[in-house]
Image: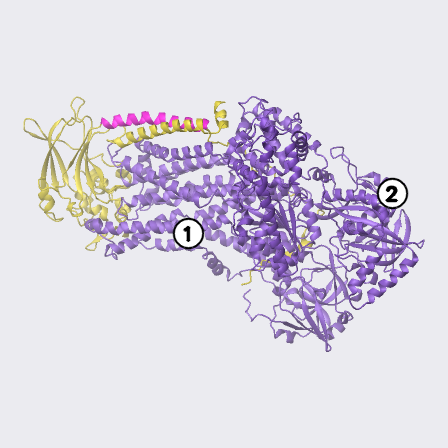
Amino acid sequence: MMASSYSAKDEDGHITVTGPGGAALRSKKPENTAFKQQRLPAWQPILTAGTVLPAFFIIGLIFIPIGIGLFVTSNNIREFEIDYTGVDESSPCFNCSQNFSWNSTQPCTCSIPFSLEQSYENNVFMYYGLSNFYQNHRRYVKSRDDSQLNGHLGSLKPSKECEPYAKHENKPIAPCGAIANSMFNDTLELFYNDPNGTKILIPLRATGIAWWTDKHVKFGNPGDGLNLTAEFQGTTKPVNWRKPVYELDSDPLNNGFINEDFIVWMRTAALPTFRKLYRIISRKDNMVPTLLRGNYTLEVVYNYPVRSFEGRKRMILSTISWMGGKNPFLGIAYITVGSVCFFLGVVLLLIHHKYGNRNNSADISN
Amino acid sequence: MFRKRFPPEEERRVRANDREYNEKFQYASNCIMTSKYNVITFLPVNLFEQFQEVANTYFLFLLILQLIPQISSLSWFTTIVPLALVLIITAVKDATDDYFRHKSDNQVNNRQSQVLIRGSLQHEKWMNVRVGDIIKLENNQFVAADLLLLSSTEPHGLCYIETAELDGETNMKVRQSVSVTSELGDPNNLFSFDGEVVCEPPNNKLDRFCGTLYWRDKKYTLTNQNMLLRGCVLRNTEACYGLVIFAGPDTKLMQNSGRTKFKRTSIDRLMNTLVLWIFGFLVCMGVILAVGDAVWEREVGSLFQSYLPWDPPVNNFLFNAFLSFWSYVIILNTVVPISLYVSVEVIRLGHSYFINWDQQMFCSQCNTAAEARTTTLNEELGQVEYIFSDKTGTLTQNIMSFNKCSINGQTYGEVTDPLGPQAKRLDFTPFNPLADLDFCFYDDTLLESVKVGDSHTHKFFRLLSLCHTVMSEEKSEGELVYKAQSPDEGALVTAARNFGFVFRSRTPGTITTTEMGRPVTYTLLAILDFNNIRKRMSVIVRSPEGRIRLYCKGADTVLLERLHPCNQELMNITSDHLNEYAADGLRTLALAYRDLSEDEWEAWSESHRCADKASDCREDRVAAAYEQIEQDMMLLGATAIEDKLQEGVPETIAVLSLANIKIWVLTGDKQETAVNIGYSCKMLTDDMTEVFIINGHTVQSVRQELRRARERMIELSRTRDGGKESGMEGWGEAYFSGNGLRGGQEGDGTESGGGGGGGGKPPQCPPPPPPPPPPPPPPPSPPSNLMDNVSGEFALIVNGHSLAHALEADMETEFVSTACACKAVICCRVTPLQKAQVVELIKTHKKAVTLAIGDGANDVSMIKSAHIGVGISGQEGIQAVLSSDYSFSQFRFLQRLLLVHGRWSYLRMCRFLCYFFYKNFAFTMVHFWFGFFCGFSAQTVYDQYFITLYNIVYTSLPVLAMGIFDQDVPDHRSLEYPKLYEPGQLNLLFNKKEFFICITQGIYTSVVLFFVPYAVLSDATQSNGVPLADYQTFAVTTATALVIVVSVQIALDTGFWTVINHVFVWGSVGCYFSIMLALHSQSLFRIFPNQFHFVGSAQSTLLQPVVWLTIALATAICIVPVLAFRFLKLDLKPQLSDTVRYTQLVRQKKRKPAGRSVGSAWRGVGMVAEGRLGARGGSRRSGYAFAHQEGFGELITSGKNMRLSSQALANFASRHSSSWIDTLRRKKHNHTHTPPSASGECSPAPSCVSGSLPPLSNSSSVLGGSQETPIEEETVPACDVQPVPAVSTKTHPAAAAGPESAAPPGPAQASSSSVLGSSAVRCHGGDSPGGWTLSLGSVQEALFGWKGFAGRSGASNSQGLPPVAKETSHIE
């Protein structure tokens, strides 16, 4: 391949060069603008001791109080956690966890007693927690059809992302996909064991546990949502479900795709150990703590198998502050970072004082 | 272009007027194709080419991977959008380029030429010209192909050509046809011509042709003298006929034009290496994660199948892991995003525009701005180590001007006061109507002398008007045009013309002049022609009165030997003048005459005739005859011709050498000329330790000369090192290793006569604080190693024929090691191809970045083969420009191109790359960490839109703005401190180490960005109790933290915050939030529910205080260590640029006008004090008609070329105001610097030996010192340290122990110049800013005007410091 760059124009050099007497004698002088001459006014920051060291101290001084505040707040939060998987033979749920089948019609129940050392003020939030459950697995995360969940049953053809939970017995599954199929379906009930021996059922609120956008935007029942049974005609329930989606709740506003338990489940967790909001125990009045100190019983309808993959199930009770639930890490991290910054500031100051070039310090002193 | 390949030709047979016969050989036609595509082939070929780029193929591969659902971890659009964009942009660019190539090809191919077909001349397009055709050329036409000259309209079959396009030489050349064909005057005769030429196959040797013409059973030898080569222009010849021998691609021009290589910068190559490394890294990550996946799927995934079954084709964990590997390759590919290449191109384009827009590289005389013709090489401009320069037209203007003369012991032409009022240019017209208006001369005493009729002056000019081989042409009365074969002669004859001795015309036997208005005709008796050995020429003329006189002009060395003894006194004076002229870099000639009696003439004439007719040893006998008559001459005087340098050449060379750039001059000119220019542009100086000339004609002799030169160098530097140099070396080391400002401060406890006031303090030499180490025994290392450490200033001059040997494979290394130890290398008589070879040699052996600069077609090959080619858009056509990467019109713009634009580009590119790799690692590696928590499933951490937009939108503009606009120091500072250029040459700003630092930082950031949100969010809940650890919240938090961290990082990296930077940085962050909110908005979700899964996430996440606290925490953890590290680096080990920048800041803060005025006043003093240093025993450089060729005398006397056409080409009178000459002169003798090397040990202050100009030679340390010097100490009261003695690097250990021991010991690292600077600071700059200006001023002074101060401190040395003075002389 001859890739000579010889150019014919070259030979014309003498001829085509327009002399100064050329007709179109226009100065080709570049414009004298600050931009073109790279003289734009500019701020030229330099990391001098005068700017860096104070920055360290300021960061330190800001972070430490925040950290202390966070730490104190976090410490004031009450949290109680109980594992009810039933791994140990001694565990009340051991039996339920042992004989499990997705299709058993006979629900297995177990009750776990526990006691709260402190009384819980304000609203108490009840979570279920799962461990070793990979809701963040790529194949799991994508295995859903947001269009369907939004109420577009449309052609009754779920997205192929739902495979292999898209169709069952030639009927489209509603809701399709692995996420929906594996929905958590234990039922948890909480009883207060009155010192006088009675078991009082604590009322649990099942609404208000999902994101507002999820409930009102992202999820929607097909049609007008009045006659769900009819709307879901032609679809089938997910393989693992015991009842179809339109029978999740009796409340029409919390049924079908907009059932909040369902929505909460569908919001996949980022990490394999996670908790999801299950119920809210609302405060009744200001005088009485929501949950009194004392003994309680957790009644579990044990439907959800986790032992096959060495998962764990937990129930968590927690109060909430302005910054959310118990979170000691944040406070400690802030205090640490703040202290390190402060310390660094001191060290750098010393180094600068001892070894740094004097001119910079001269500058600082000015 | 896809010509069929034939076995290589062994010889070429061409029969004239016989197309059939010639077609048998299938010689290339005269059609030239430089284009690559046509309409049909464009798409496939171009795509094919583009996918030869590894990057493009790689992304295509990724794209294919993404289409496989089991693997696809990202949507396809994340790759295809940028890839398509890149491909389209490149294709459009290629198409435009090729279109223009087509156009120019067509233009050339369709040129008309007259071809003799069937006995008549027909117009044919160039491309239809065939080998064997006879074509007719007319005056001023380009030669269409390589022709054998058959006949011309001129007598004797002569014709004249200009070969500027071919070899850059502007003087005309004569070609002559073989005598038998020269008679074939008209087409009919030519048609019957059926000679056959047998010759060598096509080659690229411009000066050689070897062939034989068979015609009518006779053989005629053909040489280059009979050839007209394509690219030449026919001049002064009405028409000529030629036989096409080589056509199209076979022509010597095309064979010489070489292949276009796609030039890549070293950063490019590094980048490609790094990309490969990253690719390897990516594979490693993929493998790690795939192994993880295998383990996970086996241990966990298989159990988890009831919830999450494997995708249908997958049936075991290994296959799953295999797929996972590819999935990870896809999501981790963002470590090398395709936007890297696009961004790099954009940045380079921006830099190119800045070069195009630079007003300071605009030449108003030629109305040309600098042009970056290639947009891909800018950052390499910041790394140049070798410059290869053409001479004519590049360093010089190729204008000779009669500058000075010495007549009878009286020198003329000196402009008395350099600072005085601008001398008036003499106006010759009233005195002499025939004067050339372009001629410049300023000394009116000479004109007076002519007017009063001084006989010596008259003889002097009469000689100039008679003794030459110039042709004249007078179109109308008084309108004289001289056609000189060498511009020197033209200048001399023009000078004579203006001073009243006008050469009017000549015939073979007469010369007609007008002397002081009176026409005189001399009989020309003989021309004793010039040749290289004689170095002189003479004419013998008979005046109308009948006196016979020999006029001789020649190199002073030969001429002065042949003078009559009575000239002794005059000779001494003239000799002094000659020295003076030579020291000024002028080309000198001595003039003499001899009166001959009739008898003498007769006798000699007879002997000459005898010699001429002798058959054997004719040359020698003629020379002897010449020798015989050129004796006992009377000296008339001497002339000095200035080969006008381009503006600012010496200064530019000085600055560039201070920047540690080595400059080689490669010229087609003669050795003498080249050396002369070397002196006048201060590449060579009389202070040089030794100048080696390699002149051998055989391999052995060249090898021997090279070896001798090396031995001598080692020997010399060893003697020096053995002596006090070792001490110096220690000094140098201590000096250079002294970090940053502190060294300077130590150094400035000294004082010499700086400032306006201080002239009197004699610099003294205190004993050096650390005793100089004992001379290290010369290590017994191989010569090549030794050569690296050679100290001293050497220069190497290599002749073309020696170079040919030196470039042979087995001698290459020897040549390189010798040449690279020299400060200056000049290669003369170099062919275009040799130029390229030399460049290639350095490229391969030195691994250094080379830059070639030239203006002529002969420089094209060199321009193409160098890393960077610069074309001077001058008078010599535009071929060099067309093949160059950068072009401008003045050599001096080179310093701005390199030191300002190149440096900036390099800096910006490096910063850009560092940041770019950082940000992508920070971005991508989060996926890696996340892999351990998501079952190695290649789940991305971020929203796919974030991944798509991260590199294109969220983080691209701030880093682009930095890459385009960033400046560490302003432009004038980088010119003031050429040392700032060094990091680029040493490749300090972006190399593998820097790269590792970047990616380490990136990985650290990614760790923080993943684990901080992980730790915080895993248990955190919103204030309404909803857990925060859902995937979408986590994604939004991490992404936001990432954007904020990298924005803070770019804010830290940006050193020059223009409005644009502000807009881009803040804009990007703002953009991120708005785009994210938009993408997470309900309205988009309602339209495409399946595409926007993240609906509502942004709003709900960003309302959480915990999220913001997390982001703040992550940012702090990421940035604080960086901040601390950078601060420490800046505080403890500042780079020169940091220092300069810092001083800038200080100066801005406290600007006081007083300082500046003091500085300039001081500078003024420096200028005035600068005396004439020229009288040093300069090596005299005789300048006999350098471009002269032998044989013109013969042509004249034979009358062959008496006809001259109207072409007015040679106009050698000076056209420019000489004001700049003054400047030049003022600044002369200043540039005896050594390029200081980075470590200091490599350049152990060679000044010591070159010692005749002590402070000058320290200039290297001046600049080295400037690194340390410029920060004044505001806190120190002014003037309190004056008595601290000056420290001179020249301090001899022994001497230092002497009288100065009483002096307070001062740190001795600073050179005297920097001492001066800093002392000035102390004195005037009690308030800092003034001092600062001053110290800068002094540095500047050191650069350009240190002569005055040199003189001063030299003087003070001798007065106040005997030991030093003694030593200086000792060294000398």
As drawn, is B1236 to the left or to the right of B1253? Answer: left
Q: Is residue B72 visible to us here?
A: no
**Residue drawn 27% across and 56% down?**
B319
Q: Quadrant of the C terminus of chain B?
A: top right
Whole-percent x and y of residue B1192? 78, 59
| Mark in front: 2 vs 1 | 2
The image shows residue B315 at horizontal and vertical percentages of 23, 57
At mark 1, the secondary structure is: helix
Magenta span includes A71? yes
Q: Residues within 10 Å of mark 2 (few under 14, many from 20)?
A: many
Q: Which residue is mark 1?
A: B276
Task: Write the residue at 61% across / 29% down.
Answer: B1299
Q: Chain of mark 2?
A: B
> Which segment is the magenta one?
A49-76
Color style of the picture: by chain
Q: Which mark is residue B450?
A: 2
- Please, is residue B805 above or below residue B347 in the view? below
Query: Outermost residue, right direction?
Result: B545
Q: Could you tell me the amino acid type at mark 2? A: Val
Q: Mark 1, residues whose alpha carbon is within 10 Å: few (<14), some, or many (≥20)?
A: some
Give the chain coloured purple. B
